[in-house]
Image (spheres, rainbow, N blue to C red):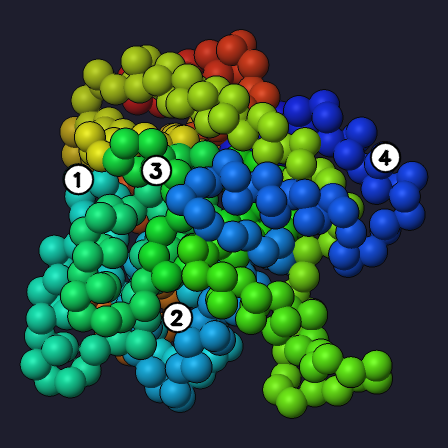
């Protein structure tokens, strides 16, 4: 590939933080850079949250679910259109996912569907053990409505904000601060990266302390190794955290640049027949981590695949939107609540190259290839 969907983009300060870690020999799972990364990230998010650095976003979601003590077969309601790492941890806990459709107005978990299902489930005593909405492609889910519903029915809300670091909900509230707990990812393709890593966020200190204990092999206080429960080796290393310190400094700049890239795509392609971009409701300020669009083949005269393959011919990476989990062979027979909006997004949706270090000339090239395909 010459032009990537989303690639790491260092800000420049990362090296000096990594050097500082080397100089003090904290080439270890724990160290001052990790502590500083957690503190600075918590400051950045605001709302009085605490942060715990972990080895991945998936590990963060696993720990969050683990701490809810789900019974085998417990139902966890989750956005169907998500990445594997936003869903597999439900299986690690022997729970059962129920997949939910998106709201066409935001492409995030539909609060109306959740509300109707909660009402019905409360009557039959079948409330879920947790609800896990996904912040899709850099856009926060509707935190106000989902938090209110979770509180009304007493169901823990774990927000998968892996794709939305730097995004905002409502008036200046940061994505990643929602629910009982939220999770973030710093994988290499996300808006900022630690070369692989994640974070658990919560306003409830108890969860952060418990997760710290569980993520470092559940060692009871004793001079020898003493264990009364089992744990995990999920802690973020000090070197990735040092990279994260540099990346956090440029997070807002990265979000601004990705929004600019989106605006350029929208201005150039938004008027073409059959093309529709992911909407941004008034309550959201998305990062546009990935520019996501829909191609209606009847109106556009070409399909999503035609455009994807035309781009591939020019060594430009693009990708269909996430395949909804209820359509995956792994989850055949599982319950799905929705109207198939996510299925249509998968059929016709495409993510365009959105790296924050993409040059204007590279983006112009992407646009002209898409245009040429559309004009057939
Ligand atoms: C990337 C991602 C994850 C998992 O994060 P990792 O750090 O890759 O484990 C979880 N959920 C969603 C929606 C993601 O995009």
Instruction: Name the residue: 45% across, 56% down.
Output: 202
Q: Nearer the viewer, residue 125 or 45?
A: 45
Quarter of the N terminus within the rendering: top right
CA–CA distance in space, label 3 to label 4: 33 Å
Which residue corresponds to mark 3? 173
The earlier-in-sequence mark between 2 and 1 is 1
Q: Is residue 2 above or below residue 141?
A: above
| Mark in front: 4 vs 2 | 4
Instruction: Name the residue: 65% across, 43% down.
Output: 37
CA–CA distance in space, label 2 to label 1: 28 Å
| Mark in front: 1 vs 3 | 3
Q: Nearer the viewer, residue 61 or 210?
A: 210
Q: Secondary structure at mark 4?
A: helix
Quarter of the C terminus within the rendering: top left
| Mark in front: 3 vs 4 | 3
Which residue corresponds to mark 2? 329
The tag on residue 19 is 4
CA–CA distance in space, label 4 to label 2: 46 Å
């Amino acid at each position: 590939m010459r032009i990537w969907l989303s690639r790491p983009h260092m800000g420049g300060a990362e090296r000096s933080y990594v050097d500082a870690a080397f100089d003090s020999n904290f080439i270890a799972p724990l160290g001052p850079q990790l502590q500083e990364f957690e503190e600075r990230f918590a400051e950045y998010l605001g709302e009085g949250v605490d942060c715990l650095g972990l080895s991945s976003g998936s590990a963060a979601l696993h720990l969050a679910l683990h701490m809810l003590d789900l019974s085998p077969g417990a139902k966890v309601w989750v956005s169907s259109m998500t990445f594997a790492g936003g869903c597999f941890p439900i299986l690690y806990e022997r729970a059962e996912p129920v997949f939910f459709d998106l709201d066409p107005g935001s492409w995030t978990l539909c609060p109306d569907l959740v509300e109707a299902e909660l009402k019905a489930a409360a009557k039959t005593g079948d409330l879920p053990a947790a609800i896990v909405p996904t912040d899709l492609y850099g856009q926060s889910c509707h935190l106000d409505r989902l938090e209110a519903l979770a509180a009304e029915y007493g169901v823990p809300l774990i927000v998968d904000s892996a794709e939305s670091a730097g995004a905002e909900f409502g008036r200046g509230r940061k994505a990643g601060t929602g629910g009982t707990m939220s999770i973030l990812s710093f994988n290499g393709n996300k808006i900022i990266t630690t070369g692989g890593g994640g974070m658990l966020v919560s306003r409830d200190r108890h969860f952060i302390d418990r997760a710290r204990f569980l993520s470092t092999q559940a060692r009871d206080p004793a001079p020898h190794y003493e264990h009364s429960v089992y744990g995990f080796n999920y802690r973020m290393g000090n070197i990735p955290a040092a990279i994260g310190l540099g990346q956090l400094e440029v997070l807002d700049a990265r979000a601004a640049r990705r929004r600019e890239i989106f605006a350029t795509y929208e201005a150039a392609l938004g008027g073409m027949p059959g093309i529709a971009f992911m909407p941004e409701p008034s309550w959201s300020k998305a990062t546009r981590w990935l520019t996501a669009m829909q191609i209606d083949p009847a109106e556009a005269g070409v399909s999503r695949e035609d455009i994807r393959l035309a781009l591939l011919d020019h060594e430009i990476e693009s990708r269909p939107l996430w395949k909804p989990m209820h359509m995956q062979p792994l989850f055949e027979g599982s319950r799905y609540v929705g109207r198939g909006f996510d299925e249509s997004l998968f059929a016709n949706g495409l993510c365009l190259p959105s790296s924050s270090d993409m040059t204007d000339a590279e983006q112009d090239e992407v646009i002209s290839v898409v245009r040429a395909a559309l004009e057939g």
